[in-house]
Amino acid sequence: MRERLLLVPAILTVLSGISANWMQFRGPDGAGTSGESGLPGSWSSTKNIVWRTKLPGPGTSSPIVVGNRVYLTCYSGYGLEPGKGDMDKLMRHLVCVDRGKGAILWTKDFKPVLPESQYGPGGNESQHGYSSSTPASDGKHLYVFFGKSGVYCLDLDGKEIWHKSVGDSTHGWGSSNSPVLYKDLVIVNACIESGCLVALDKNTGAEVWRAKGIGSSWNTPVLVDLPDGGAELVVNESSAVIGFDPASGKELWRVTGFNGYVCPSVVAHNGVVYVVRGGALAIKAGGRGDVTKSHVLWRGKGSSLVSSPVYHDGLLYWPTGSALCLDAATGKEVYNSRLSQGAGFYASPLLADGKIYCVSRSSGTFVLATGRTFKELAHNKFEDDDSRTNASPIVNDGCLLLRTDRYLVCIGKK
């Protein structure tokens, strides 16, 4: 197993509930799963709502939880309507929310490096906006990525420790990838900004390594634990799925034969990497060189435009407009079933308490049962909030935390 966080006494109080913390995109191991139980399966604007907090602006990033605080990013001033507004007024925000009461404790503003990608009609930037990267934390600091505006390290009260650029390019589809922490490194997929994976010293911001040649990759790398105790960093890239040494940035292996942009992150279980893009495949981790012929365990049907899959008890699940389930051992389709209402998905599914939570962009949240038989348990909508919902939900202390473009909502049983 990769090195875990060693807590110093000064932060033990903040992290007294560390098992419940959710400190990066898709939670522990980037897998989108939680062992918590007793979670709500149904809700509305009034049912099972613990609190709801109005946000200073929209965003696609997921919240994270560190101790008794929730952190998430937003933007304001520009990009609220395609083709309208003054880019000079664009501002990004890091918001700190009291986990118990939902009150905003503080907001830190970030003036972007301009020009940013244009928020125009029909472009994907207008589909997810200017705050799409989920923060990461080691329990002592926060690491926030704002594309060409760079990576920020802050303490838990929002004080800036360091700031580092990882590239200055933009793309009409914007920037979205979230930081990953490994030992003393913060690793960013700066595909849009510089065509690289970049690792920074998490204490100083100094660049430690840079891996070039990452193209059209709008996804967050995943750390994969190996049976021998080692770890690999795996990224879904336009032409290949690539495994790197996270300590040095050295490429270890790749599976080739792809083309086109790719958004979903991989997931891993017991040393097997599961990939969903224009088709699905399973790769045995730990190879060296081009392992296209030697380490691909299966290839199957089923694709995803944006949502990453989730693994549970030998099955892979993800939504695409319908609900898909594959057998993780063979890649064979278990089901491909219609949901009760048509929907599009940017958020990745969350698996917890025997349920799969699939948050759609504008049609609410579909709650599915785990297992080999498709069963839609509930379809939940906020009647008074029809705003865009692209962020993946998270679990903390018996509740779901879900953000829309307007609100951060804590959903729990009363």
Image: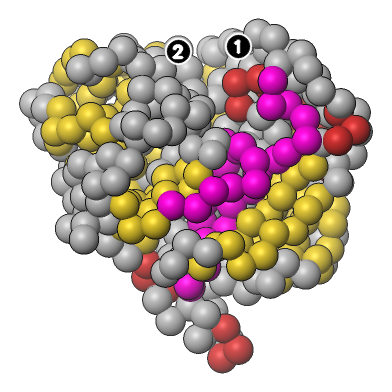
Label 2, secondary structure: give it. loop
Report the side of 247 relative to 335 (left or right).
right
57 within the magenta span: yes
Report the side of 174 relative to 58 (left or right).
right
Q: In x, y percent, where is residue 232? A: 53, 48
Image height of 252 relative to 127, above or below: below
Q: In x, y percent, where is residue 192? A: 75, 28
From the image, tell me which residue sits under label 1: 260
Query: 143 or 384, which is in the foreground?
Result: 384
Quadrant of the drawing holding the N terminus: bottom left
**What is the three-letter code of the residue carrying label 2?**
Gly
**What is the three-letter code of the residue carrying label 1?**
Gly
Q: In x, y percent, where is residue 263? A: 55, 25
Report the side of 68 relative to 370 (left or right).
right
Identify the residue shown where x is 67% and y is 65%: 106
For label 2, count other residues whose C-alpha is less than 10 Å away and answer few (under 14), some (14-19) or many (20+). some
Q: Which residues are magenta?
A: 52-81
Numbered badge on residue 278: 2
Which quarter of the figure has residue 331?
A: top left
Q: In x, y percent, where is residue 11? A: 57, 83
Which quarter of the figure has residue 304?
A: top left
Q: Earlier in the sequence, mark 1 or mark 2?
A: 1
Mark 1 touching mark 2, by CB under 8 A?
A: yes
Image height of 192 relative to 70, above or below: above
150 within the magenta span: no
Image height of 292 relative to 224, above or below: above
How was the colour assigned to the protein in this rendering?
secondary structure
Label 1, secondary structure: give it. loop
For label 1, count other residues whose C-alpha is less than 10 Å away and answer few (under 14), some (14-19) or many (20+). few
Q: Count all numbered tags in the image, as a single digit.
A: 2
Identify the residue shown where x is 37% and y is 70%: 19
Asked whether the viewer can see residue 375, the reply is yes
